[in-house]
Amino acid sequence: MTENNPPWIRICKLEDIPRLGARRVDQPQGPQIALFRTQDDQVYAVLDACPHKGGPLSQGIVFGHAVACPLHNWTIELEDGCARAPDKGCVKKFQVKKEGEHLYLNALEINVIET
């Protein structure tokens, strides 16, 4: 296994996440991750904690390729994980891939396996 070919963990099917919706990936050890599906079926994975006050982004409103934090309405761009100006800060992004109808996360990034 190389950096270009990491181990992938199957998380769910694309249809398990509604368009303009989210799904939280809870892990007993490791980060809580939010998967987002846009209207055009792009899928993004970020840490489920707003960089402002840690609000659960998975409970926010998805619009375009962004999500609004449910606590203080910060807008987080899903493509880069950064807050829109004038707000500042970024949330960690995770590699996600679509293969057929399934979605996968990079296991090395989410601490599922030891490196």
Image: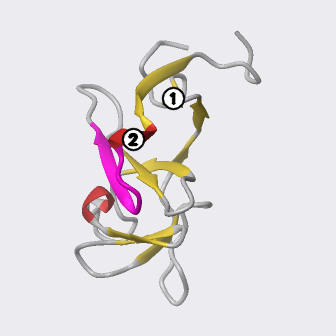
Residue 67: quarter of image = bottom left
Q: Secondary structure at mark 2?
A: helix
Query: In this rendering, would 30 be left or right of 108?
Result: left
**Label 2 CA crowd tier, 10 Å (few <14, some 14–19, many 20+):** few
The residue indicated by pointer 2 is 15
Which residue of the protein is positioned furthest toward the top in this rendering? 1
Residue type, mark 2 in image: Glu
| Residue occupying the point 29% across, 44% down | 24
Residue type, mark 1 in image: Tyr
Whole-angstrom CA distance, mark 1 to mark 2, is 13 Å
Tell which circle, 1 or 2, labels the residue nearer the N-terminal end.
2
| Residue occupying the point 52% across, 90% down | 86
The part of the chain drawn in magenta is: 17-25
**Label 1 CA crowd tier, 10 Å (few <14, some 14–19, many 20+):** some
The residue indicated by pointer 1 is 104
Residue 31: quarter of image = top left
| Residue occupying the point 58% across, 35% down | 98
In this picture the colour scheme is: secondary structure
Magenta-span inclusion, residue 30: no
> Percent x, y for residue 29?
29, 26
> Where does the C terminus fall, quadrant-wise?
top right
> Percent x, y for residue 53?
28, 69
Query: In this rendering, would 79 be left or right of 19?
Result: right
| Residue occupying the point 44% across, 77% down | 75
Q: Secondary structure at mark 1?
A: strand
